Amino acid sequence: MRLARQLQVERRRTLSGLRSLVPALLMFLACTADLAVAIPSETPELDPPARADQATLEPERADQATIEPELADPSELRAELVAATPEAIAAALAAAEQEVHELGIRAKLRYSPAGPLPSSAGLEPAYAERRAFALAGDLDQVRDWMALAKFGTDAALRGPLADYDLIVTREGEHAWLHVIVPVQGLDPDQHPIGRHEAYVAGERWINLADRLEPGRHYLPYKTNGKESIDRQWGRVDVIEALAEIADDYEQRTGLLLGVGDISHVTGGKILDHWTHREGVDADLYLLDHQHLHAGRPSIWWHHFRKARSIWSSEPLGKGKREPRLDPEDELSDTPTSQRLRVLAQIVFPRDPIAYFVHDDPRVLASFDREVGERRPGRRYLHAQNRGMWPRHCDHVHLRWVDGDLPVGGTPRP
Ligand SMILES: [Zn+2]
């Protein structure tokens, strides 16, 4: 099993290595295309014989058509693909039990439904068909087990149970991790990722890393270096919107957006935050990918002093100043304040995002004046209007809120 896991990791690495070769390949193809243009006289001569060959091939197609009736009935074929045999399911379930044991998870395995059973999670049929077991625990235990099962112990991004459907449910301070053999069984050659989701307070949650590839479409990032994709769970509409925002940001800046904490898979208390408990908060980082710090992109801190916005390499205006785009112009953006402006524009038409929080009034004040006309109570909160919200000097905080928003005062975090 361990060897198989290692191979999966290697395959991922090889794939990402190949992906990094794509630009070079495209360059090569572009060059060869140029070469082809340089020898156009040869192509007309080649054309007719090629067409003739194709014509002679056509009768074979007719043969294929006569073979078709001998193939199995398509519906039978589909049935075979859709449902694995009971033996295959039992073997896959036993392998999952073994993996749970190897991960050091010492919880009792339960083979009957327990806890909330949201119908769209498909838990009842899974238990009825003996494809599932559950691990019950408190919120901390279940989030740890899910992280181990889905992402593994070595940050390989693919845990030993990633092929399985992994469903987390929660009720009060209790949670369950359901490990399920997919209906079609496990495919040892393809290793598709299973369906991984959580149901918290009646909402379906998913993980950002299942929607965007970390390191390729966005960068998991926290200023303290403790970023983790297992803290990037959120309500499905929040994750979908974040994926679009990161994509838009990359198209407009050419840079990967940094994404920090969203929520734990179970929701609930999370280190470093008062909020981020309900899958509707996200921290975004306007990373400077040109200046690396210990191999990581750096950030510039915003400091608001004497009605002026300062961007510097350390908090509170200390360290180096970030150079302005136009050194002659006092009011010119810095690269980071320009990225903040781009992100503010990207978020502006997205009315479900009630609050956009970052300390820089220079960039956010005009957005705050206008955004309430789109949705009453929507706000861009900054150093001069944030009320009880904590300082946001190194990242942007987004908060989704359903329903009516308070109008006229400063919203509470
Ligand atoms: Zn935050």
Image (cartoon, rainbow, N blue to C red):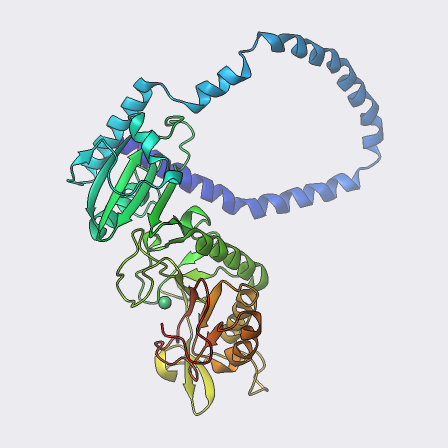
Q: Which residue is at 78% across, 17% downward?
A: 55
Residue 312's image quarter? bottom left
Give percent across and percent down for residue 379.
48, 74
Residue 175 versus residue 369 in the image, above or below: above
Residue 222 versus residue 332 in the image, above or below: above
Residue 238's image quarter? bottom left
Residue 56 versus residue 328 in the image, above or below: above
182 and 219: which is toward the camera? 182
Give percent across and percent down for residue 390.
34, 76
32 and 175: which is toward the camera? 175
Looking at the rendered image, the quarter that the N terminus falls into is: top left
Q: Is residue 233 visible?
A: yes
Q: Which residue is at 46% across, 90% downward?
A: 307
278 and 384: which is toward the camera? 278
Q: Residue furthest front?
A: 404
248 and 221: which is toward the camera? 248
Image position of 138 (left or right of 368)? left
User: In this figure, what is the number of numbered marks?
Assistant: 0
Give percent across and percent down for residue 46.
80, 26
Q: Which residue is at 47% across, 84% downward?
A: 309
Image position of 137 (left or right of 7)? left
Image position of 363 (left or right of 391)? right
Residue 46 versus residue 269 in the image, above or below: above
Q: Residue furthest bottom?
A: 306
Residue 382's image quarter? bottom left
For ligand 1, the image quadrant comes to: bottom left
Looking at the rendered image, the quarter that the C terminus falls into is: bottom left
Give percent across and percent down for residue 133.
25, 33
Q: Is residue 153 visible?
A: no
Image position of 290 (left or right of 8)? right
Q: Which residue is at 26% across, 63% downward?
A: 271
